[in-house]
Image (cartoon, helix red, strand yellow):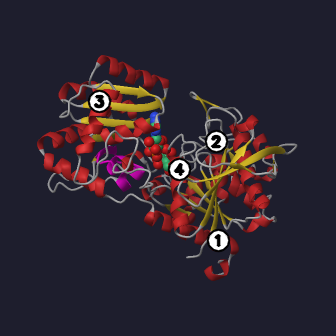
């Protein structure tokens, strides 16, 4: 394996700015790659919400971005990922990024998202030229940066960046970034790319599709999702493209940053704990119950939820199942999330109707997310689809067995509990129905009450599990090698 120069271009990166798991992935994988000896750098926009952690340095040279009829100008701020030798460059252009949100505010997307992310894709590549640092691989993430592989294959093919391979990771196929045809002109991509075998879909520009057609290699975030999206029923209209590119599509499971997510060192928790010693977890449960207005009942099985409240996550099934579950089991619910206003209201109403039993916090709160993981006895994730999912990994790492629907990365990460042997990591159900979810929550309650040794073993296996990036970072390094090889031709040694 060779040491590579790898540029990540991404719309979010933890701990600076995060909407969902894409940020966790982009904040963690580069660290693991740097530890393997690769020179990894990250480019992301400077939104108003970016937290300026650590040391930040503006670059003296302005950055001209080749978009639209006349170039845009930006300033670049340089910092690094906390605790890692990974430079991060934030692109400052207030007209495009100086806003409160990443993709939008409330439930409304910004109307100029096509331009904002075309500019990001362009800026990242121009910055490489300015730094005189030509990556071997540019690693783009989801629709926002689907423009990158298209640019590298077209207008930049004969530039110094033309030898750079691209790897395009699908984090979530449900969002494709549909834009007006004019976006292609704004990107200064030849109009001939507005074609069904490139950027065009349903008469509009689709950067997810463009990325899939043009990337040297495609990855997605779990092996099962890599299979699912090739099928019409779960390909979100792009299954034909994914089958066409099938030989270059690889599913690699996301890892977690085991230092950032560790109940034995997590300074945000009221007490810490680890394998074999759960006293601190009981303290966290008590704090969570207080914080969310739940009854201080150490023996009640407490189920946590941390999620975007959107259709994909299936939490409407939980809202539907809860009244009957609360009537038949002594459980409590601690839910943190925001999203669909109707679902937010449904959970607020459930909290009002069940004081002391259902605690709901609508919003985004990184510290409370950790307390929910630590203080709960089990974690609910009824996703209709889940490319990988990170919250079930955090839950297991925090000794909180997850209850998941059998889909995507949840199948690959949560081995089901086996009543006969006591083995497994969590509870699984199949149908996306309230009844099936209620059945699995009921089994978790029964195990908690009637087979405490089994429940303790589930917790312990999670606490001792290795969910880090080790094997997956090595798999990405291999994909980078394949991509370089494919881009440059010849044998692997010649691509070094
Ligand atoms: P997705 O990316 O589809 O939202 P993941 O499970 O991969 O799902 O990642 C979600 C990430 O966002 C996790 O780090 C989770 O803790 C975090 N998260 C989701 N909702 C909230 C919230 N309301 N407050 C704080 N963190 C949240
Ligand atoms: C997406 C997916 C989620 C995945 C995350 C990080 O947001 O919905 O399943 O874990 O990206 O790859």
Q: Which mark is residue 171?
A: 4
Question: As drawn, which residue projects farthest toward the right?
Answer: 70
Lower sequence index among marks 4 and 2: 4
**Circle 3 residue:** 289
Q: Residues within 10 Å of mark 1 (few under 14, many from 20)?
A: many
Range of the magenta residues? 395-413
Cα distance, mark 2 to mark 1?
A: 27 Å
The reply to whether discs 3 and 1 touch (Cβ–Cβ < 8 Å) is no
Mark earlier in primary sequence (3, 4): 4
Label 4 and label 1: CA atoms lie apart by 22 Å
| Ligand 2 is within 8 Å of the C-beta of the residue at disc 2 | no
Residue behind label 4 places its C-beta within 8 angstroms of ligand 2: yes
Nearer the camera: disc 2 or disc 1: 1
Residue 273's spot in the image, x, y percent? 29, 48
Q: Is residue 406 magenta?
A: yes
Of badges 3 and 1, the one in the foreground is: 3
Looking at the image, which residue sits at the far front? 55
| The N terminus sits in image quarter | bottom right
Q: Position of residue 4 (x, y in %)?
A: 62, 70
First-in-chain label (4 vs 1): 4
The x, y position of residue 404, in whole percent, is 33, 44
The residue to which callout 1 is attached is 484
Sooner in the amino-acid sequence: mark 3 or mark 1: 3
The image quarter containing residue 165 is bottom right
**Quadrant of the drawing holding the C terminus:** bottom right
For this view, does 439 lie left or right of residue 311? Answer: left
């Amino acid at each position: 394996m060779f040491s590579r120069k790898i540029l990540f271009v991404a719309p979010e990166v933890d701990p600076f700015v995060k909407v969902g798991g894409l940020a966790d992935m982009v904040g963690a994988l580069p660290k693991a790659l740097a530890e393997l000896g690769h020179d990894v750098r990250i480019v992301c926009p400077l939104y108003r919400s970016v937290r300026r952690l650590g040391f930040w340095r503006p670059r003296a040279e302005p950055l001209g971005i080749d978009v639209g009829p006349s170039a845009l100008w930006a300033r670049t701020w340089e910092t690094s990922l906390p605790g890692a030798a990974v430079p991060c460059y934030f692109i400052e252009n207030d007209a495009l990024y100086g806003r409160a949100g990443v993709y939008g505010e409330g439930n409304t997307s910004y109307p100029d998202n096509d331009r904002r992310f075309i500019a990001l894709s362009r800026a990242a590549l121009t910055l490489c030229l300015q730094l005189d640092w030509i990556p071997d691989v540019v690693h783009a993430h989801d629709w926002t940066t689907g423009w990158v592989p298209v640019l590298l294959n077209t207008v930049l093919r004969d530039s110094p960046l033309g030898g750079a391979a691209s790897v395009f990771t699908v984090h979530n196929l449900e969002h494709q970034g549909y834009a007006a045809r004019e976006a292609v002109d704004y990107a200064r991509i030849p109009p001939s790319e507005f074609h069904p075998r490139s950027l065009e879909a349903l008469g509009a520009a689709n950067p997810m599709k463009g990325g899939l057609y043009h990337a040297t290699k495609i990855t997605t975030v779990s092996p099962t999702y890599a299979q699912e999206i090739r099928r019409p029923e779960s390909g979100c209209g792009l299954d034909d493209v994914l089958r066409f590119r099938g030989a270059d599509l690889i599913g690699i499971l996301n890892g977690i940053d085991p230092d950032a997510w560790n109940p034995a060192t997590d300074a945000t928790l009221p007490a810490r704990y680890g394998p074999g010693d759960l006293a601190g977890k009981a303290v966290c449960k008590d704090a969570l119950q207080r914080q969310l207005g739940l009854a201080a009942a150490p023996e009640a099985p407490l189920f946590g939820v941390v999620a975007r409240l959107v259709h994909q996550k299936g939490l409407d099934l939980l809202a539907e199942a809860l009244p009957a579950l609360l009537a038949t089991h002594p459980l409590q619910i601690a839910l943190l999330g925001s999203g669909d206003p109707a679902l937010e209201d449904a959970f607020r109403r459930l909290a009002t109707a069940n004081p002391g039993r259902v605690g709901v916090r609508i919003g985004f709160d990184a510290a409370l997310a950790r307390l929910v993981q630590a203080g709960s006895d089990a974690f609910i994730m009824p996703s209709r689809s889940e490319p990988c999912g990170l919250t079930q990994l955090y839950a297991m790492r925090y000794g909180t067995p997850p209850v998941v629907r059998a889909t995507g990365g949840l199948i690959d990460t949560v081995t089901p509990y086996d009543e006969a042997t006591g083995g497994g990591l969590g509870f699984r159900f199949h149908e996306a129905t309230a009844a099936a979810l209620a059945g699995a929550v009921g089994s978790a309650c029964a195990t908690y009450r009637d087979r405490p040794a089994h429940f303790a073993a589930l917790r312990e296996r999670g606490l001792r599990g290795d969910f880090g990036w080790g094997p997956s970072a090595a798999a990405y390094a291999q994909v980078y090698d394949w991509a370089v090889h494919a881009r440059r031709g010849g044998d692997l040694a010649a691509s070094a």
